[in-house]
Image (cartoon, rainbow, N blue to C red):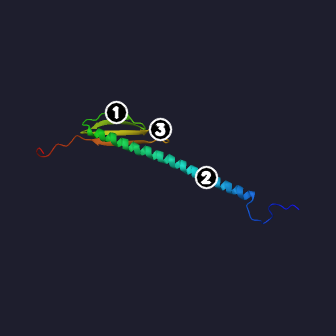
């Protein structure tokens, strides 16, 4: 006499339960992969912006050290920097634009600074 391998009410999993578990697991794995991908992209954008601020600060600092800065541009491995200098009375306005190259999202940064001549010394020689 042949009996079935599984009788009604016997312990174990049926095909439907296994398929549902596989689908739930696949959805969870896809969510984890999407989250990791988004995290990597966000970190790259943040890194590009951080370096844009660093590059802008370095270029602006070097321009403020010069007594009479002039307009110009410079290209770094991941950023392009361009600046203009406009006289405004006794001071000069420096406008610095930084553009990220090869970034997943376009990032640009604009900084403005005033460049003033050094103040005259008050008093005698030091």
The correct choice, above or below, for 38 with respect to 7 in the image is above
Q: SS at mark 2?
A: helix
Return the residue found at the far bottom.
Answer: 9
Along the line of sight, which residue is nearer the eye, 81 or 112?
81
Q: SS at mark 3?
A: loop
Q: Which residue corresponds to the image point at 30% horizontal and 39% vertical from the top-left? A: 62
Q: Residues within 10 Å of mark 2 (few under 14, many from 20)?
A: few
Q: Nearer the viewer, mark 1 or mark 2?
A: 2
Using residue 2 as the reference point, say whether residue 67 is left or right of it.
Answer: left
Q: How far is the residue under mark 3 from the one under mark 1?
A: 22 Å
Give the label on residue 29, or none.
2
Using residue 100 as the reference point, say whether residue 34 is left or right of it.
Answer: right
Q: Nearer the viewer, mark 2 or mark 3?
A: 2
Q: Looking at the image, do the residues carrying marks 3 and 1 touch, with CB atoms under 8 Å apart?
A: no
Kindly indicate the quadrant of the structure image that contains residue 77: top left
Q: How far is the residue under mark 1 from the one under mark 2?
A: 50 Å
Q: SS at mark 1?
A: strand
Q: Which residue corresponds to the image point at 70% horizontal and 56% vertical from the top-left? A: 20
Kindly indicate the quadrant of the structure image that contains residue 47: top left
Q: How far is the residue under mark 2 from the one under mark 3?
A: 29 Å
The residue to which callout 3 is attached is 102
Return the x and y of residue 81 as percentages of the image width and height: 38, 37
Q: Residues within 10 Å of mark 3 (few under 14, many from 20)?
A: few
How many numbered callouts?
3
Return the x and y of residue 87 as percentages of the image width and height: 28, 36
Q: Nearer the viewer, mark 3 or mark 1?
A: 3
The residue to which callout 1 is attached is 72
Q: Residues within 10 Å of mark 1 (few under 14, many from 20)?
A: few
Q: Quadrant of the N terminus?
A: bottom right
């Amino acid at each position: 006499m042949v009996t079935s391998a599984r009788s009604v009410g016997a312990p174990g999993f049926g095909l439907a339960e296994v398929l549902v578990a596989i689908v739930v697991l696949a959805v969870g794995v896809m969510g984890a992969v999407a989250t990791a991908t988004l995290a990597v992209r966000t970190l790259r954008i943040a890194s590009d912006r951080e370096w844009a601020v660093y590059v802008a600060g370095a270029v602006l600092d070097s321009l403020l050290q010069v007594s009479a800065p002039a307009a110009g541009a410079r290209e770094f491995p991941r950023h392009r920097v361009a600046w203009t200098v406009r006289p405004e009375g006794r001071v000069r306005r420096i406008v610095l634009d930084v553009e990220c190259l090869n970034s997943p999202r376009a990032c640009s940064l604009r900084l403005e600074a005033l460049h003033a001549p050094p103040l005259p010394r008050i008093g005698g020689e030091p």
